[in-house]
Image: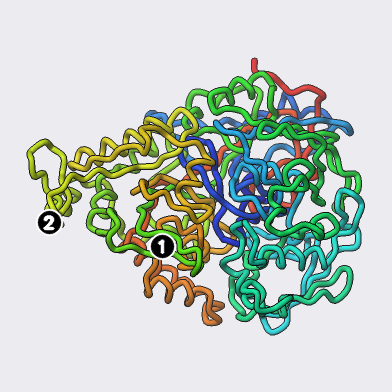
Amino acid sequence: MRKKGFSKWLLALMLVFLLVLAACGGDDNDGNASNGGDDNNSTENNENNDEGNNDEGNSEGNDEGDEGDAFASPQPDEEGVFSIEDFQTAAPSGEGLEDGTLTYGLVSDTVFEGTLNWNFYSGAPDAEVIGWFDEALLGMDANYTYTQDGAATFEVEDGRIFTFTIRDNVNWHDGEPVTAEDWAFAHEVIAHPEYPGVRYSGSMTNIEGIEEYHNGEADSISGIEVLNEKQLKITYKDSTPALLTGGIWPYALAKHIFGDMEVAEMEESDAVRKNPIGFGPYEVDTITPGESVTYVRNDDYWRGTPGLAEVTLRVIAPETVVNELETGGVDMVDGFPTDQFLDNYEMSNVNFLGDIDLAYTYIGFKLGTWDHEAGEVAPDPDKKMADVNLRRAMWYAVDNNAVGDRFYNGLRWNATTLIVPSHPAYHDDSIETPTYDPDEANRILDEAGYEDVDGDGIREDKDGEPLVINFASMSGGDTAEPLAQYYIQRWADVGLKVELIDGRLLEFNSFYDRVGQKGEDDPEIDIYQGAWGVGSDVDPSGLYGRNAMFNFPRYASEENDRLLAEGLSEEAFDVEYRQSVYSEWQELMAEEIPVFPTLYRALVIPVNKRVVNYDMSAGSDTYLYQLAVTEEEPVVAE
């Protein structure tokens, strides 16, 4: 499939609009609230690489697959630490069974929410589900730039006027053609004043006339014009480099199904919850809410006949993923818990693929709230975490290198800035950011006035009052609890009392609701541990812009506004200029610290040895519909 793992490439594209991706969900302790999906693959973000043997499950019709010796398992060093560079990114290629079936595991300790439409969903687990039956109209290449090989092509005039042409053979699962009106309708719904979702932000507001429509001042969006059944014209206000790298909303919404509904009721409708429709390689057959989905082959798929007759997606707990893989209960999963990899990397019946993930984990500080009326963040200088010295000290207090080795065996490693190494042209590794130094943390806290007034080893606030910092962290995987406790202990070592909110970890959906993915910030939360799957474009405004609901810290500053705007300016078409802007932005964030990144990460995907034609790397020419199996039953572990 096209882009780091089916789960990551689709997700990166789904996240294109908010430029987030993200979701991890339920894996370890750092889910993603994300957005979007597409044909490049999706179900929440980026993907990774491979390893394995090719002599058991791939023998039938596998012209390139009989090179079993080429699939050697990555080996750890003496300390049990792996390197992502030792992984491969693709399973063998070859002919599969005509009527093969596959079971896909969604690793999560919670059910998927069931908002099964790109225009309405908010969590990575739902994106995983959607990615099998629906996709974006635009394709992407290895540089995360829109291409002409998707379900629609495009022409550009003046850098901001796009004419899209949907291919004639692109049809919804019920046989109705996917039309330009469907694509326009998706924009109209997202921009509607009663739209309940999170997609109206970022580059969506760059469309001419969309704000007037959103504010009820116009009955239509002047910048969107349906030319004919298959052609759509969109005029953007500004020509920015982000338009071709994720700044276009690439998802249609079937108007013949949703057209008569009230916008406020669409998200909860049967067309989203029970009978979702798309134009992807598989169509939904049955749904067990929150637990599983059965898909069947879409014989009318525009790229060609899909390689599988049926796919079953099942939610499986992180504690059971190894057993499910060993026994053939699932053929592959969206991501393997890295904390379990050291004990299972030599699993005999799977090929482990891997790659650098388009994602990072982080500690976020609540600095304000969301202003629904203004549609922007509202920083509060009286918030408990408002002092940047307190935030900086907490960064110095934690040892993320040790976390990466201890909890993830090298498959996660210390993060420095908020632009990840998956965007090497923009990630600035020369910027010095806090690394583990408890003495420096203590010095900062002392000078800032956070002193232990009563001698009990716990610091009071600057007014001498008790200071308790409430910490929201997510459940999922064996490392979730010990990792949260590790951070709590490191902060305790420098005299800060940090406690889990409600005294426990929060499940995925509850976590992001309380952190603020719908604009409702739990006032009891002071800090939180989250993760983002980043989008195809380097632009971070979908996460840290003043008008971004996913700006969970509720941080804003004039300097941040300026840099984010400059990164999307016409001058930013000059790559060197844009690099300098985002280098300056990375420095700003390291100085003001609304969040601090903790870990960059690898995505590891185990694939049963009967699976062929799967590639998780960006720019691959292997698509989801080509996924196939060479044997009727999964290979089981010896």
Coordinates of residue 565 in the picture (x, y in percent): 48, 75
- The reply to whether the C-beta atoms of the residues labelled 1 and 2 are less than 8 Å apart is no
Coordinates of residue 545 in the picture (x, y in percent): 47, 66
Disc 1 marks which amino acid?
Asp
The residue that appears at 76% across and 50% down in the rendered structure is 134
Which badge, 1 or 2, is on the more N-terminal residue? 1
State left or right for residue 316 relative to residue 498. Answer: right
- Front-lying residue, 336 or 132: 132
Residue 147: name its quadrant. bottom right
Per the rendering, the mark at residue 428 is 1
Q: Whole-Å distance between the Cαs marked 1 and 2? A: 30 Å
Per the rendering, the mark at residue 447 is 2
Per the rendering, the mark at residue 112 is none
The residue that appears at 44% across and 55% down in the rendered structure is 552
Coordinates of residue 203 in the picture (x, y in percent): 60, 70
The residue that appears at 39% across and 39% down in the rendered structure is 404
Mark 1 Cα within 10 Å, few/some/many (few <14, many 20+)? many
In this view of the protein, can residue 479 be seen by the observer?
Answer: yes
State left or right for residue 360 relative to residue 71. Answer: left
- Front-lying residue, 614 or 166: 166
Disc 2 marks which amino acid?
Glu
The residue that appears at 39% across and 32% down in the rendered structure is 504
Residue at the extreme top of the image, as rendered: 638
Q: How many marks?
A: 2
From the viewer's perspective, is the residue at label 1 or at label 2 nearer?
Answer: 2
- Front-lying residue, 137 or 268: 268
